[in-house]
Amino acid sequence: MSTADARILAVVTALPPGCVATYGEVAALAGLPGRARLVGRVLAALPTGSPVPWQRVVAAGGRIALP
């Protein structure tokens, strides 16, 4: 896992219940502005049953972005 991946997962894990953030916001909070697609790739690579609350990250339009 790279440092960028760890920063992204730390930001997503810190999102409190009931709150959502966009992929772009997560990237900016992780110190990676403009890397929203990287956030998507990191979250897509999570194993099934991961405790990371990936569902709290939404697309810019406010919806969960499924493949």
Image: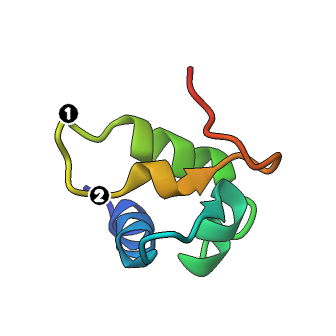
Up-down: is 33 above or below 5?
A: below
Q: Nearer the viewer, residue 11 or 2?
A: 11
Disc marking residue 48: 1
The amino acid on which the numbered mark 2 sits, given as a three-letter code, is Val
| Residue 19 visible in the current orientation | yes
Residue density around tag 2, few if under 14, some if 14–19, many if 20 or more, within 10 Å: some
Q: Nearer the viewer, residue 57 or 41?
A: 57
Q: Secondary structure at mark 2?
A: loop
Specify the quadrant of the image occupied by residue 45: top left
Are discs 2 and 1 less than 8 Å apart at CB?
no
Q: CA distance from mark 2 to mark 1?
A: 10 Å
Quick check: 53 left or right of 33?
A: left
Residue 20 is situated, as x and y percent measured from the top left of the image, at: 59, 65
Locate the N terminus and report the quarter of the image it occupies: bottom left
Quick check: 32 left or right of 1?
A: right
Residue 60 is situated, as x and y percent measured from the top left of the image, at: 79, 51
The residue drawn where x is 21% and y is 56% is 51
Up-down: is 3 above or below 53?
A: below
The residue drawn where x is 54% and y is 43% is 40
Locate the C terminus and report the quarter of the image it occupies: top right
Residue density around tag 1, few if under 14, some if 14–19, many if 20 or more, within 10 Å: few
The furthest residue to the left? 49
Q: Nearer the viewer, residue 28 or 3?
A: 28
The residue drawn where x is 60% and y is 79% is 29
Residue 6 is situated, as x and y percent measured from the top left of the image, at: 32, 67
Specify the quadrant of the image occupied by residue 25: bottom right
The amino acid on which the numbered mark 1 sits, given as a three-letter code, is Thr
Q: Label 2: which residue?
A: 52
Colouring used for the render: rainbow
Q: Secondary structure at mark 1?
A: loop
Specify the quadrant of the image occupied by residue 66: top right
